[in-house]
Every structure is written in structure tokens, then in C-alpha cells.
Amino acid sequence: MSGQTNAADLLHIIRDPFVECTHRGHVAIWRHGEGLIAGWGDVTGRILPRSAMKMMQALPLVESGAADAAGLSDVRLALACASHKGAAIHTDAVTSWLADLGLSEPDLRCGPQMPSDEAALHAMIRAHGAPDQRHNNCSGKHTGFLTLSKHLGGGPEYLEIDHPVQRAIRAAVEELTEETCDSYAIDGCSAPNFALSLEGFARGLAAYASAGDIGGVRGDAMSRLVSAMMTHPEYVAGEGGTCTRLMRTMHGRAAIKTGAEGVFGAIVPEHRLGIAVKIEDGATRASEAVIAALLVGVGVLDPTHPEARTLMHGPIRNRRDIVTGHMELARGIAGWGL
Amino acid sequence: MSGQTNAADLLHIIRDPFVECTHRGHVAIWRHGEGLIAGWGDVTGRILPRSAMKMMQALPLVESGAADAAGLSDVRLALACASHKGAAIHTDAVTSWLADLGLSEPDLRCGPQMPSDEAALHAMIRAHGAPDQRHNNCSGKHTGFLTLSKHLGGGPEYLEIDHPVQRAIRAAVEELTEETCDSYAIDGCSAPNFALSLEGFARGLAAYASAGDIGGVRGDAMSRLVSAMMTHPEYVAGEGGTCTRLMRTMHGRAAIKTGAEGVFGAIVPEHRLGIAVKIEDGATRASEAVIAALLVGVGVLDPTHPEARTLMHGPIRNRRDIVTGHMELARGIAGWGL
């Protein structure tokens, strides 16, 4: 059992005039070919990157040629990197992708999940229906796993740690992060999730940010995934989702991905930067505020844009729409810039 | 702007084999007539007790004679202390209570909120309906405010800080906690929420725990509220709610109340104890685990009861019902006992 220590104050939740809550955590900003250029908290302790590492889990799919062999569109590549909301556009895309593989919903191993897209959720409740595995926010990643498994001739239990799919992912993650993936935990979708140091995770994200310089089969594969995420942000999360909203706002200047329990990753190609955030207590409101502030700091997110402003500062409103408070980024994070 | 410092580690979230998250916070345990008998973190910093102080906000309702004048049942007193789920039993009770006062839903000032009770929520979605203010988890507290306002001859804007209802609450809270309520924030339901030190809040809860010894009009009023909460736990939260489940489990040995942003309060009459918990980051999973551990520590909650065990230790399961982790109370909290 390992973990991080010395978390830094990152965000205060203000219920005027009081500091009602404080979120602490860890941040690593890595420039490819250079190293750690900024850090808060403990950048060497290990984290579980959760869904924020999906673009790394999708790398063997592209790099192996499986994606081309299956004729995958950029929409499907974006879905392979997604934590989607289970909206119709997501489940329809997964359904047709599975069909093209000669597979169907029972071949997935992610488990069912209620959609978080409101329209899909309400439609399901009105129909007295139940979700299936296609509604799971990770079903695109899993369909990517199935695509790779077919290409590699793997068996149906593609989540087993020694399955060719997971072995390929482990090898890719180790090379990208320059770390040894000697342990893992089981994710919400049942996939292995490799433990990485926060700076190792940022190093891997920075490799994606330098995909053009890296070139070759790997560089091209990373470029394609980053481009797919930025070109189709509605497939990476969904309407209302933070990744979707912020990527739309940034117009192709960064690819970002949230993860459970307060993780956020960002890839900023124009600066060859990878940014990794882990909130100690797992709070999404804090990981979102901090990643927005850092994207402002590197110059790819306009701090006056309503999406950015709301994520960083609030306001916090109550059930009568009265403003009861706001958020304040901790010193250091608030003023930081490249 | 004030706040607390030096939060103590209270709960670790384990995704095996890693510590994935840590929750820090503050705990004060006060024995009436004696003082602070145990504390973690900072017990003197000010918190917003939020809904965990509802039994204090309900005291003038009973103490003034307004409750008797209106012939309030114990169910209605429990509702006045509740953060209910907007289930039919809650909204029906509020509707009839308002009618008995000659009032109706527009007289409330809490704002509308979707029910958190699944049956009520699904029924509303199926009917393409919208919630009104009776569904707000605080509508019982607000109907209590209206009952007191009528008794005191107050105007309709019963949430204004100088309204007789709020002045009476402020006076009661100051006497119970032996602190000056010189500032407040606006709660989710728009009511003023007075800032208190954590130990002051625990001191007030301990007064409730000693209501029988205190006696008189105040002691009787506190006894009635504590008894109403313990006798009708399904009106204090609702089916599935932690306050309801734990109070049922404890069979009248403690009254407990959760509050937003990681607050929990407990009243343990047999030991004249008030327990106040504030999680620094506002996480409910942590406030619930910690209050359960402390109730075990004072001997009123059976640690082997499934409700207690699950709140304190998990397990944490994923979407295929696989156990992916558990929770571990920090040293000190885990082993603490009277």
C-alpha cells in the first residue's frame, strides 16, 4: 500500500464570508524533453490515473494497426478515450462498432451503468428500462479493447492482466511514462488500472503533446488519438461534460481527460506539456477548477470565457438561485503561468 | 473570512492495494457539564453546521409554545429537524401541515428541489413533472419556521435575519452553544446558517443529550425534539438515508443528523455527549464513516451490524459488483472508545 504525502492546498470553497471547505492535492507539469517545470504537493507518490489515462490504454489499438484493420473512424477513436454519458450518440456508436466486429453487448466486460445524460436517463426511466453495458461510460474503451483483442487473436476475457490486450497496454504505458507498472488496481469498469507516479503520468501525457516530434508509428498513433479527442469532444464526455465543454472552448489547443477520484490529465501540444492533477480527497469540483486554472496558466484557455470562469470561481448558487458563495484557487495555482 | 487549520487524517479510501484518497477533518466530543473529552484536528475554528443544526433551529418552535398551539405531532417535529428525501410520506406530511396553518406551497421560501427518493424521483420523471418547494429536503424545517412565525405574528419573509423567527433561533443557538452568533452564511435552502466553533456546536448537541437533567421549558423542548427524531427516523431522512438507517439500528440510543459539506452531529443521551464532525473537503462518505466509528466508540452502535460495518469499512464495489477496495479509518479514530 503506497500513497502520496504533503498535499498542497489547491482550492477553497467559500460560503460567504466563510471558507467552508478546502481541497488539497498534487500537480505535476512536465515538458517533453525537458522535465518537470512546475509541481505542487508530491509529484513522486503513486496515483491511480483512472479514466484520465484512457488515451494511453487506447495506444496499442492504433499502434498495432488494429484500428486501421477495423477501419476505425476518428469518432470511434475518440470514444475509445472517452468517459461518455451514455447518450444516444454514444450508445448508438458503440452498438454499430460492436456489430462491425461481429460482436454484441454481452461481449463487453464493463458492467451496466445508468446513463448520466439526462435525456437518455429520463427516457430509460420512462420506459421502465434498465441500462446495459453499452451505457457504461467506459464502453468505448472496452470496444477498443475488443477491437485490439480480435486483431491480436486474444480470448474473450480481455481484462485479465495477462491477456494480450492488457500486456500491450502495460508495455505502452511503461514506455510512455518511463516507469515500471509493477502493480495495478481494478477500475470501476473492471479493467486493470496501472499505478504511476504523478510525474510519470505527466511525462506520458507530455509524450502525447510531442507526438509530432516523436513521429514514427508511435508518434502518428498518439497524434491521431489527440486529434480525435479534440475534433470530437462530444464523444469524449457528452453535452454538459467538462471535457467536452473545455475542449470546445480551446479549439484544438489541448486534449483533456478527467478521471474518477479527482484525477485530471491535459495534453498541450503547442508547449509539449503534459499536466497531471490528483485531488487528495477525490473531489471532481476541485480537479476541474485546478485543471482550468492550469490551462489558463499555459495560455490555451481564456480566463474570461464563461466555461473557464465558472469552473474556476463559481459562483455557487442555491435552490432559489441565490449566490451563496464562490470558489478561490489557492495562491500559487491562481497566479501561476508559463 | 475564517476557517479551520490542522485537519487530522480521518479516513483513507483504498483501491486495493493503494491508498487512493484521504479525507481529513475535525472532530469534537463534548460531555455536558464536563467539557471536551476528545478532539481531532481543530475544534476551535468555525464551521457552518448546515443541516446538522436543524434540531437547534427547531428549538424555538417548541420552546415558544408554537408547536403545542398548532398541535404538532412528533412526526411533524421530526420533519422540522429533517433533511428528507422528498418521498411521498414527506411531501404529504408537509402539505397537510401547511394546510392546517392555512398556508400552502407558495408560502415556503426554500426553493424547489428534485426528490432524492428514487420512487418519487422516477414518478416525477415519468409524469414529466417538476418539483416544488415541498420536495426541498428542508421543507419540514421551513414549515416549522412558518408555524413559529404565525405564533409570533411575524411577516411572510421568515428567512430575513431580523425576522422574529431568525432572531429567536439566534438567541437559542447562542444559549445552547455559549457562543456569539455574530455571523452567518446563506444555506442551500436560503435560511441563515450561523457559524459556530466545532466545539461550540458539540457543546450545543451535548445540551440536547442532557435535556432530562436541564429540565424546565427548554429541557422539555429539547427532549421532545430528540425523542421525535429517534422515534420517527424515516421522517428525518427517508428510506436508504444514513440518519434513518443508523437511528433505526441504535434503537433510541442516539439522535444523529447529517449536514451538507461533510458535517455530522450526534446526540447521545446516556453519556450526555454531543459529537460534531466536519470533513475539511466536504465529503459525505467520510463524515458518515467517522460518525459511525465514533458512535461505535461511545458504545451505542454495534460495529458488527451491517449498516455500521458498511459505512465504516465498505467494501467498495464496481459496476460488475466486484470488490475493488474498502475504507480504512485513520488510527486514533478507528480504535477510539470512551
Image (cartoon, coloured by chain):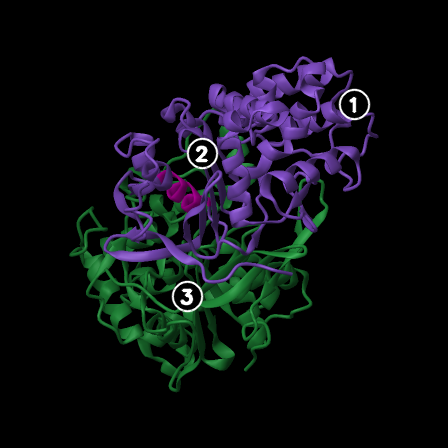
Chain colours: A purple, B green
Report the number of numbered marks: 3
Element on which disc 2 rests: loop
Residue at 53%, 21% (x, y): give it.
A228
| Mark 2 → mark 3, Cα distance in angstroms | 62 Å
Name the mark nearer the viewer: 2 or 3.
Answer: 2
Classified by dominant secondary structure, the portion drawn in magenta counts as helix
| Front position in the image: B144 or B21 | B21
Mark identifier at residue B234: none
**Chain letter belonging to callout 3:** B
**Chain letter belonging to callout 2:** A
Mark identifier at residue A150: 1
Kind of residue at badge 2 = Arg
Kind of residue at badge 3 = Leu
Residue at 35%, 53% (x, y): give it.
B141
Look at the image and give the residue range highlighted in magenta. Answer: A284-292
Q: Residue furthest bottom?
A: B34
**Residue B103 shows in the view:** no
**Residue B122 shows in the view:** yes
In the picture, residue A338 is in which quadrant? top left
Name the mark nearer the viewer: 3 or 1.
Answer: 1
User: Residue at label 2?
Assistant: A272
In the picture, residue B211 is in which quadrant? bottom left
Residue at 27%, 66% (x, y): give it.
B64
Label 2 close to label 3 by CB (< 8 Å):
no
Q: Is residue B215 left or right of residue B184?
A: right
